[in-house]
Amino acid sequence: MRILGIEGTAWAASAAVYDSESDDVFIETDAYQPESGGIDPSEAAEHMRDAIPRVIDAALAEAADRAADHEPIVDAVAFSRGPGLGPCLRIVGTAARSLAMTLDVPLVGVNHMVAHLEIGRHQSGFDSPVCLNASGANAHVLGFHDGRYRVLGETMDTGVGNSLDKFTRHVGWSHPGGPKVEDAAKDGEYTDLPYVVKGMDFSFSGIMSAAKQAYDRGVPVEDVCYSLQETIFAMLTEVAERALSLTGSDELVLGGGVAQNERLREMLDAMCEQRGADFFAPEPRFLRDNAGMIAVLGATMYEAGDTIEIEDSRIDSDFRPDQVPVTWREGESV
Ligand code: ATP
């Protein structure tokens, strides 16, 4: 079976083909890079309009190469329905609907956050892990219970990556800021920043204000970056550990663009090792936004019969992971 996946919730115009026989994923991505500042929704949508046809052409060419003469090029079209920027999602939704109709195959509507965590579950082979989603616009700790991914903890304000990006914009660095924070942190020392975990939730906005103020006071930027990483990642690690403890799970998967950060992976790995849990983080191409994760979850949903009619396939820019009935995992829970 081959599934075409299309992703376009914010910055990545991406299309992929997942071949379930070989478990192989082809991904073509065209990234929007703001000239200055952060992601501008109308510029991102303009980029999406321009780039989505190109990346889809590349993915379909790959699918056609893999298809035998008598076979359909793809068995279904999966697309990210949300959460994300409405103007971008609408372009992706329109492309997915028209392709499904043209190719005469079913349409699968994928929740982008569930895709971020399911790719880790798929690749790790873990049974019922706790999932930490550390992405640009979000930060969630999730566990599966009674047919849904339950949000065990989440950010009370900004997403974890967006908060790092806000700090780097203040410093005058180009988007995205996360990798620049990681580089600068290598030469830094600790300076005090607020640590904000309330119950199972975390907040990043106060830390960002304190980081900006520290930088404005003349604290070396390397020290601020080091302390941002140590503080924010310790908060994520604390909540992930508590989620493992509360659910009794001994498996943790990491997802989202911030998960490309080596220090975050190191802290989670050490925590898991200390409590005898297994830890898995997918390779970077599956962590940042990408259509591969949409195609892989699309295949699982398609196999479970979880397809949607065109008239029911509207996008949802606030689509939460706990709104998704997990049709492909009946009976399991952490
Ligand atoms: P979401 O998936 O929630 O919609 P998103 O679309 O912004 O978020 P992702 O691709 O998941 O995108 O993540 C992008 C974020 O990851 C950016 O905020 C970026 O700064 C951050 N990031 C990328 N690499 C690193 C890194 N090495 N360290 C920390 N953060 C990073």
Image: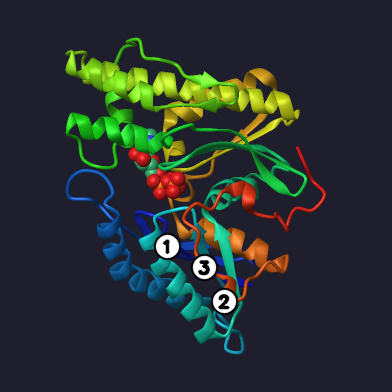
Where 176 falls versus 239 (above or below)?
Answer: below
Q: Residue at x 22, y 35 (%)?
A: 169
Residue 136: quarter of image: top left
- Determine the CA span between mark 2 and mark 3: 7 Å
- Label 2: state its secondary structure: helix
In the rendered structure, find residue 314 and report the number of the disc placed on it: 3
Give whichever of discs 3 and 1 has the lower sequence position.
Answer: 1
Q: Residue at x 41, y 27 (%)?
A: 204
The answer to whether mark 3 is within 8 Å of ligand 1 is no
Which class describes the residues within 10 Å of circle 2: few (<14), some (14-19), or many (20+)? few
Residue 183 lies, in percent from the top left, at: 29, 29
Residue 97 lies, in percent from the top left, at: 50, 76
- Label 1: state its secondary structure: helix
In the rendered structure, find residue 89 and report the number of the disc placed on it: 1
Where 323 falls versus 135 (above or below)?
Answer: below
- What amino acid type is highlighted by mark number 2? Glu
- Determine the CA span between mark 1 and mark 2: 16 Å
Q: Quadrant of ligand 1?
A: top left
In the rendered structure, find residue 311 and report the number of the disc placed on it: 2
